[in-house]
Image: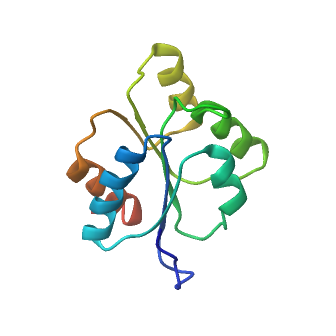
């Protein structure tokens, strides 16, 4: 897990209960030079989240305990608004509809293309590209 030392830098938060998926995305983030923190659960994220100006969340939906949709609802309830990229293996119309309603930046199905994910994160940093 990397720690962001620059408050202006973008922090990429990753939440996925699958250790292999987290490690693969961490390798992509590291190779792209992103500051990141990864969590195996939504509860872990909530306890370690320190809001910054340029944060982005990469979120799995199907997790034990608080799932991704529940986390999106909690963030909205708490008035926390940050760009979200959903990466899920369990695509269903109801989840897709809620993510659209919430304003999710991107909705990717696993196995997600790491380069595409990196491009989306970079775009979120500078949408004028």
Q: Examine the image and state in which quarter residue 42 appears.
A: top right
Q: Position of residue 71 (x, y in %)?
A: 66, 39
Residue drawn 36% across the image and 45% down it: 21
Residue drawn 29% across the image and 61% down it: 27
Residue ranking furthest to the front: 19
Q: Position of residue 60 (x, y in %)?
A: 48, 38
Q: Is the residue 56 above or below the residue 88 in the image? A: below
The color scheme shown is: rainbow
Q: Position of residue 18 (x, y in %)?
A: 44, 40
Residue drawn 36% across the image and 60% down it: 26
Q: Quadrant of the C terminus?
A: bottom left
Task: Classify residue 31 as left or right of residue 69.
Answer: left
Between residue 73 and residue 13, name the one nearer to us.
Answer: 13
Between residue 78 and residue 129, name the one nearer to us.
Answer: 78
The number of numbered badges drawn on the structure is 0
Residue drawn 35% across the image and 54% down it: 23
């Amino acid at each position: 897990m990397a720690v962001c030392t620059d408050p202006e830098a973008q922090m990429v938060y990753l939440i996925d209960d699958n250790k292999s998926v987290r490690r693969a995305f961490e390798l992509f983030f590291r190779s792209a030079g992103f500051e990141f923190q990864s969590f195996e659960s939504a509860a872990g994220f909530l306890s370690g989240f320190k809001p910054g100006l340029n944060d982005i969340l990469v979120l799995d939906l199907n997790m034990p305990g608080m799932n991704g949709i529940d986390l999106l609802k909690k963030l909205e309830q708490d008035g926390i608004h940050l760009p979200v990229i959903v990466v899920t293996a369990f695509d269903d119309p109801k989840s897709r509809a809620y993510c659209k309603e919430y304003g999710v930046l991107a909705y990717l199905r696993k196995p997600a293309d790491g380069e595409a994910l990196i491009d989306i994160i970079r775009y979120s940093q500078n949408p004028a590209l």
